[in-house]
Image (spheres, rainbow, N blue to C red):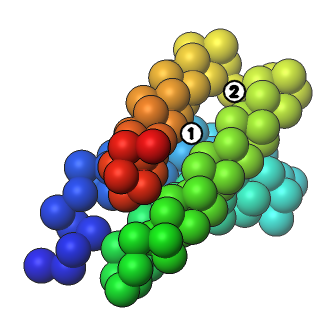
Amino acid sequence: MFSAEKLKVWEKAIEFAEIVYSITGDFPADERFGLIHQMRRAAVSISSNIAEGSSRSSRKDFVRFIEIAAGSLCEVISQASICRNQGLLTPTQFQALYLSADEQSRMLSGLRRSLQGGS
């Protein structure tokens, strides 16, 4: 088992990416290389950066990858807001994604604080 697989935050990031894939699956075909691609790429980046950071030899490096993961999470929320405004996401879909992102954000922040020694 790789070290990232032991982290609940990594598991949640995988689940978050699955939510993004699911909701973008119903988007119009003309968004295939636009919002669909952007949202999926950012969502996958979250778990990828957690995994890569967990393999680093220093806590400082791990923290940097957690910060990048948090940035990718914010990207997805920004893109989801555009999708909601364009009628590509229902209010229910947006709310579900937002709540999942909020949980993910809190978990990433907690991990970052833990790696920094509680500061």
Amino acid type at mark 2? Leu
The residue nearer to you, when weighing 112 against 26, is 112
Residue 42 appears in the rendering? yes
The residue nearer to you, when weighing 104 against 95, is 104
Image mark count: 2
Label pair 2/1, CB-CB below 8 angstroms: yes
The dot on residue 99 is none
Q: Position of residue 59 (x, y in %)?
A: 40, 71
Determine which quarter of the picture holds residue 47.
bottom left
Q: Position of residue 73 (x, y in %)?
A: 61, 47
Query: According to the image, label 1 marks what residue?
Result: 23
Amino acid type at mark 1? Ile
Query: According to the image, label 2 marks what residue?
Result: 89
Q: Position of residue 108 (x, y in %)?
A: 44, 46
Quadrant of the frame with the C terminus: top left
Residue 16 appears in the rendering? no
What's the residue at 65%, 13% (across, down)?
91
Determine which quarter of the picture holds residue 24.
top right
Q: Residues within 10 Å of mark 2 (few under 14, many from 20)?
A: many
The residue nearer to you, when weighing 94 against 108, is 108
Q: Is residue 51 left or right of residue 31?
A: left
Determine which quarter of the picture holds residue 76.
top right
What's the residue at 67%, 52% (across, down)?
71
Q: Point out the tag, 2 or 1, that comes first from the N-terminus.
A: 1
